[in-house]
């Protein structure tokens, strides 16, 4: 795949969900996209699907640090997306 900047995007497929969709780690060049999104407080880590990913421990650590900052999606009043859908 080619990203918008003209660089390579790679998927490291680790699983499929119950609907057959790919579960993958995404890299834009040498940058681990999910790590960047969680670190920048722009995304939650969906633990249900990353348990067997090679970077699960890293993402858990990055998310804990981001939550401690209390900004972005981790600011007060924001509900985890899977909890919102459940309600």
Image (spheres, rainbow, N blue to C red):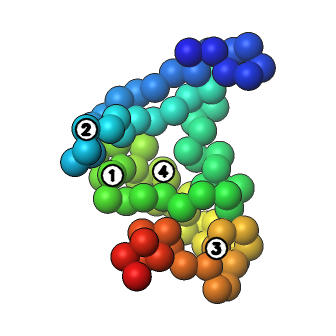
> In the rendered image, which residue does mark 3 sit on?
74
Image quarter where the N terminus lies is: top right
For disc 2, the marked residue is 20
**Which one is earlier in the sequence, the residue at label 4 or at label 2?**
2
Quadrant containing the C terminus is bottom left
Mark 4 lies on a secondary structure that is: helix
> Contact (CB < 8 A) between labels 4 and 1?
no
Is 7 or 59 nearer to us in this picture?
Answer: 7
Disc 2 residue crowd, few under 14, some 14–19, many 20+, Cα 10 Å: few
Of badges 4 and 1, the one in the foreground is 1
- For numbered disc 2, what is the local secondary structure? loop
Q: Determine the residue located farthest toward the right in the rendered image.
A: 5
Residue at x 49%, y 53% (from the top left corner): 59
Crowd class of label 4 (few under 14; some 14 to 19; many from 20; radius 10 Å): few
Q: Please name which of the two marks, 3 or 2, marks the residue nearer to the observer.
A: 2
Which quadrant would residue 78 be assigned to in this image?
bottom right
Pointer 3 local density, CA inside 10 Å: few below 14, some 14–19, many at least 20: many
Alpha-carbon distance for marks 4 and 2? 25 Å
For residue 49, the mark is: 1
Residues at marks 3 and 1, CA–CA distance in whole angstroms: 20 Å
Q: Earlier in the sequence, mark 1 or mark 2?
A: 2
For the residues labelled 3 and 2, the Cα–Cα distance comes to: 29 Å
Circle 4 sits on which residue?
58
Quadrant in the rendering for residue 5: top right
Mark 1, mark 2: which one is toward the viewer? Answer: 2
Residue 53: where, in percent of width, then height? 34, 42
Mark yes or no: residue 87 visible: yes
CB within 8 Å, label 3 to label 4: no
Element under disc 3: helix
Identify the mark nearer the N-term, 3 or 4.
4
- Looking at the image, is mark 3 or mark 1 earlier in the sequence? 1
């Amino acid at each position: 795949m080619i990203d918008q900047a003209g660089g390579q995007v790679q998927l490291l497929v680790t699983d499929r969900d119950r609907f057959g969709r790919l579960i993958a780690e995404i890299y834009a060049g040498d940058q681990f996209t999910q790590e960047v999104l969680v670190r920048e407080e722009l995304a939650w880590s969906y633990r249900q699907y990353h348990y067997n990913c090679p970077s699960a421990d890293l993402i858990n650590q990055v998310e804990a640090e981001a939550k401690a900052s209390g900004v972005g999606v981790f600011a007060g009043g924001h509900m985890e997306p899977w909890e919102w859908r459940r309600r």
